Image (cartoon, rainbow, N blue to C red):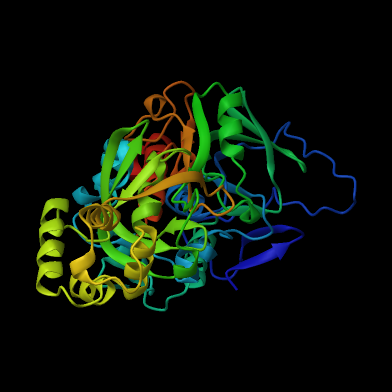
Amino acid sequence: MFQQRVGRFFLPARAKPRRTLRCDTSSVHKITSAKRALILVKGMDPYDVAVIGGGPTGLFCAIHAASPSCRVVLFEKNEQPGKKLLLSGTGQCNITHAGEIRDFLTRYGDHGKFLKPSLMSFSNRDLIRFFSDRGLAMETEKNGKVFPKSRSAGDVLSLLLRECRERCVEIRCGEPVQGIEKATGGFLVTTETGSYPARSVVITTGGASYPKTGSSGDGVRFAAALGQPVTALAPALTPVTVRDYPFTDLAGISFEDIPFTLWHGGKKAGSFSGDILFTHTGLSGPGILDASRYFAAGDTLRVSFAGKVPRDAFERDLAGLLQSQGTRLIRTAMSGLHLPDRLVRKILDLSGVPDDLTCAHLTAAQRKEIVTRCTEFPFVIDRLGDLSVAMATRGGIGLEHVNQKTMESKLVPGLFFAGEVLDIDGDTGGYNLQAAFSTGYAAAEAIRKRQDPAET
């Protein structure tokens, strides 16, 4: 067991604490009645750091902020920390991505530049080393995704909790924060149970996706109440429902690394490529999820099932194929184009081509229709998946008012942000968790340097 319970709270286990650290559990209180009295703050020593949110960002930040001279408390609304982390990578925890850290900067939409200092200061290699040095080895898949060798998100969470214990981080679970306000010498963090003074506050509450895990956008509300500018929350890494969707019976078919374009108001708004999956109601897969930050209802996606073959080249290939196989059925001849047979049959049906039509009898208009549907099939977006199905959240704390090197507010000294509560959303493949760890580390390092410059 990495934590022992006292009432509804986790606190550092007493067994064999590090010699240089003094575990202070004096502020841990049992709830002994249904009526909860506020903890009196008069005469109470303030915490050096209060971390709001017990996900991977908060835990990692607390680990690196804690020191003999820096007393850290972490508040988590759920009964246990890391609830959403346990779901990451379908429970296997795709913790980061392989490759050069500079290549990560293009994986966060328009906001990669903001992350440059934190990613460079604590890279994917640093993250892998952090876990492997503590006994949790990592492995890299061919596609670059990095997972624990155990394929267990629970092992990642257990290690983070162990590190919190060893650094005497006080974790108060089942105690949702209700508000944060400025106070003399720092801040006052108020929960249903009590009020706690802290010199610095780090908001690591995440976004609002997967609300069943406790994500509700609380951090954005806390920040706004303190005068920090925020942007509206919306789903990211989310599938789309397609208007008049014709491929329900082809659900489950996937296409590897195919190009598609985004059209808004009749004008081309972007070009993308990636893996696409047919669902029962629309499109999903990494390519769609990654690009969904740019989508809106009413937009059109034009998908090329022909892959990266240009339209004119595909049209020439099709014409040559039809001419050389004039007596064969069109659906049979098109097998030479390396498209899924069920997709070919559906495209021919949508193009008004009968099953028994031979290549020699295909009209020019029908051929043009086939070419269009193979290279620019139009999907009109009816709606995006909501926050209950989105893998991440876009929007949050406005980046222009946050110091990108320290994660500290430019407007409210001592207030820090890290992880998905910031207006940052990355692509699938471990990029969001890497940003969570890197920004959490950046905030912790800034706090420690301020707390005790001699330690860093």
Q: Quadrant of the C terminus?
A: top left
Question: Does any portion of residue 201 appear in the rendered image?
Answer: no
Residue 186 quadrant: top right
Residue 15 quadrant: bottom right
Residue that appears at 33% across and 63% down: 353
Going by the picture, which residue comes out furthest to the front? 361
Q: Quadrant of the N terminus?
A: bottom right
Residue that appears at 62% across and 56% down: 213
Question: Does any portion of residue 290 appear in the rendered image?
Answer: yes
Q: Position of residue 107 (x, y in %)?
A: 29, 48
Residue that appears at 23% across and 56% down: 371
Q: Position of residue 277 (x, y in %)?
A: 39, 63
Q: Is residue 423 above or below residue 456?
A: above
Q: Is residue 338 above or below residue 224?
A: below
Q: Position of residue 265 (x, y in %)?
A: 37, 30
Is residue 402 or residue 67 the one in the foreground?
Answer: 402
Q: Is residue 189 above or below residue 353?
A: above
Query: In the figure, is residue 31 to the left or right of 4?
Result: right
How many numbered markers are drawn? Answer: 0
Is residue 197 or residue 308 the one in the foreground?
Answer: 308
Is residue 44 or residue 248 the one in the foreground?
Answer: 248
Residue that appears at 56% across and 34% down: 220
Q: Position of residue 121 (x, y in %)?
A: 26, 46
Is residue 399 or residue 322 the one in the foreground?
Answer: 322
